[in-house]
Amino acid sequence: MTEITFNGDKEVLDQEYTVIEFLRKNEFGPETVTVSLNGSILSKEDFAAVVLKTGDSVDVLLFMGGGQ
């Protein structure tokens, strides 16, 4: 089991996930989000290579347009 902090909340993962797998599991489109891993912005090119580990802090940021 892997225990991470996801958007400020503790979460226990039932298996090992890469960042892209974790995003898809949580219904985020990898192409439309920015991911901060342990306080550093992760390159989209690294989403498939980086495996989440116990103690990691993952923040998914969504950007929305709008307004005038």
Image (tube, helix red, strand yellow):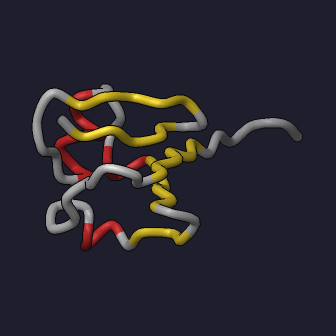
Quadrant housing the N terminus: top left
- The correct choice, above or below, for 50 with respect to 23 in the image is below
Q: Which residue occupies 75% across, 37% down?
A: 66
Instruction: Locate residue 7: give its quadrant.
Output: top right
In the rendered picture of this protein, how many numbered marks are placed on residues? 0
Q: Which residue occupies 52% across, 47% down?
A: 59
Q: Which residue occupies 11% across, 35% down?
A: 15
Compare residues 67 and 62 and report the one nearer the observer.
Answer: 62
Is 22 on the left or on the right of 11, as rendered?
A: left
Q: Which residue occupies 38% across, 73% down?
A: 43
Instruction: Locate residue 23: give its quadrant.
Output: top left
Is 56 on the left or on the right of 17, as rendered?
A: right
- The correct choice, above or below, for 10 with respect to 50 in the image is above
Looking at the image, which residue sits at the far right?
Answer: 68
Quadrant housing the C terminus: top right
Compare residues 8 and 49 and report the one nearer the observer.
Answer: 8
Residue 17 location (% of width, % of height)? 16, 45
Is 25 on the left or on the right of 58, as rendered?
A: left
Compare residues 3 and 67 and report the one nearer the observer.
Answer: 3
Instruction: Locate residue 50: give its quadrant.
Output: bottom left
- The correct choice, above or below, for 51 with respect to 5 in the image is below
Is 60 on the left or on the right of 30, as rendered?
A: right
Residue 64 location (% of width, % of height)? 64, 40
Residue 10 location (% of width, % of height)? 48, 30
